[in-house]
Amino acid sequence: MSNYRCSPCGYIYYPSRGEPKNGIAPGTAFEDLPDDYICPVCGVRAKVGKSAFYEMETMLYRCNACNYLYDPARGEPKNGIAPGTAFEDLPDDYVCPVCGVYVKIGKDAFVPTM
């Protein structure tokens, strides 16, 4: 699933996280959001709804602890992850190869970045 950025404020909607505080369950695709969905950050400026968002083209994922970038095109051959492996296809027990700080958190410690 693709991530979407709000044009006015830069908020990123991550389908994998959803917006539980707003009643949107993790795993909810952007296309499945209600038609009256507004940006939870700048709502007033984004009342045009989904049209204020655009699909993010990048597929790099940054570790929150050390800023390591996982690049699916490059993979991690040294760690047995072939080039072209999408972030979503990494094993559930994947951890940052640089800091390993998030051993108990794993992939949830990474966020898409541009």
Image: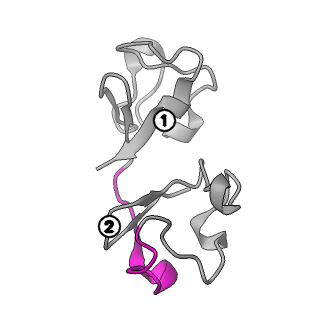
Disc 2 or 1, which lies upstream in sequence? 2
Q: Note whether 113 is above or below 6 in the view shown.
A: above
Residue 57's spot in the image, x, y percent?
Answer: 35, 59
Residue type, label 2: Cys
Residue type, label 1: Thr
Distance of label 2 from label 1 (alpha carbons): 31 Å
Residue 101's spot in the image, x, y percent?
Answer: 44, 14
Which residue is depicted at the point 55% across and 23% down? 106
For the record, the magenta segment spans: 42-58
Residue 48's spot in the image, x, y percent?
Answer: 46, 87
Q: Note whether 112 is above or below 85 in the view shown.
A: below
Residue tagged 1:
85
> Which element is circle 1 on?
loop
75 or 112: nearer the viewer: 112
Residue tagged 2:
9
Which residue is depicted at the point 50% across and 82% down? 49
In the picture, residue 105 is in which quadrant? Answer: top right
Q: Inspect the magenta stretch and tell me whether residue 112 lies in it.
A: no
Q: Is residue 114 left or right of residue 43?
A: left
In the picture, residue 37 is in which quadrant? Answer: bottom right
